[in-house]
Amino acid sequence: MTEIAGRVAVVTGGGSGIGRGLAMELAAQGAAVGIADIIHENAMKVAAEITAAGGRAHAVQCDVIERDAVERMRDEVNQALGPVSLIFANAGATSFEKITDMTEKDVDWIIHVNMMGVTNCILAFYPAMVKVRDGHIFATASTAGLMPHWIPYHAPYSGAKMGVIGLMLNLRLEAAEYGVGATVLCPGGVIGNMKAKNMSYRPERFGGPTDEEVRVPAAFVEHNTLVFRPADEVGKLCVKAVRENRPMVITDGKMREIFVRTYQNLVHEAFDFVDEFDATLAGK
Ligand SMILES: NC(=O)c1ccc[n+]([C@@H]2O[C@H](COP(=O)([O-])OP(=O)(O)OC[C@H]3O[C@@H](n4cnc5c(N)ncnc54)[C@H](O)[C@@H]3O)[C@@H](O)[C@H]2O)c1
């Protein structure tokens, strides 16, 4: 059991939605929390909420796509709050567009923020955990990564999030050798600010921020059976999973059937295909 009280945690994307839910729950359980976000103002608001409630927090502006920035953020939080032993690599951004309708920069942004954002946090925080044989790495993926052909017009996002799932589940194997835990979150629907604010998170080198809303395509709405949960509930669920070193967290238990059916169909189709091929070869 990983105790939370007395530890120092960092939550990326901690200024909003799921990240804020994680930060508030960690603080409620007695951790000091570094709130890292590309939007400094939002990170400061969450840090202020935590300190107003008697907790310890430190806000840092950080774009998780930039490895140097993540290293600077780590050093700043280590200095302000003490050595970080819990990293929550949660920052992300989305897209609901055909890949042919996206600019190359937009595709790069979605891959970088979701996949490299997590990778950069692991590279920055994990080695110190290995050294002291203690700590936990947590990353936010998505149901879109767990069931990547369920929702259309989501290709770079699904790809990056499936990458995060693979990265985390595999890293968990070697982390266990050092007593370090690893958990990946695959949220279904969670109440956050992505629909309205997503484009305001786009860094200058990928085209810069705009105030456009994410346009969710009709195909998604028709397929969508998601129940949108409050982020504070998700924060509680995730911190419990970290305490118990669970490999994966989902937020919607009603999706079990869809998940099983999706993978059964996919696996049967692929295995049947190779069996048919081998039968053809054998018949030659
Ligand atoms: N809400 C959902 O239904 C849902 C579903 C699946 C996955 N997710 C994932 O959950 C995570 C959190 O999303 P949310 O719903 O809370 O959204 P949100 O928009 O409320 O919060 C996202 C936060 O990430 C920050 N951020 C974005 N780019 C960043 C960057 N480059 N560097 C640092 N911070 C950055 C934003 O400023 C914001 O504070 C994301 O990884 C998202 O892909 C959310």
Image (cartoon, rainbow, N blue to C red):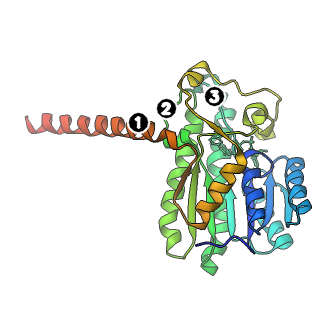
Amino acid type assigned to the residue bearing label 3 in the image: Phe
Return the x and y of residue 173 as percentages of the image width and height.
47, 66
Q: Nearer the viewer, residue 193 or 172?
A: 193
Residue appearing at x 83%, y 71% in the figure: 81
> Helix, strand, or loop for circle 2?
loop
Query: According to the image, label 3 marks what residue?
Result: 96
Q: Decide which of tag 2 and tag 1 comes sooner along the chain.
A: 2
Residue appearing at x 59%, y 27% in the figure: 99
Question: Does ligand 1 reach within 8 Å of label 2's beta carbon?
Answer: no
Q: Is residue 253 left or right of residue 64?
A: left
Report how far apart the C-alphas of labels 1 and 3 lie in the structure: 21 Å
Query: According to the image, label 2 marks what residue?
Result: 150
Q: Are marks 2 and 1 in contact (CB under 8 Å)?
A: yes
Above or below for 274 versus 219: below
Q: Nearer the viewer, residue 74 or 23?
A: 23
Amino acid type assigned to the residue bearing label 2 in the image: Trp
Which disc, if any, is residue 262? 1
Q: Decide which of tag 2 and tag 3 comes sooner along the chain.
A: 3
Report how far apart the C-alphas of labels 2 and 3 lie in the structure: 13 Å
Amino acid type assigned to the residue bearing label 1 in the image: Thr
Return the x and y of residue 192 as percentages of the image width and height.
73, 40
Q: Nearer the viewer, residue 160 or 44?
A: 44
Question: Does the rendering let one see residue 279?
Answer: yes
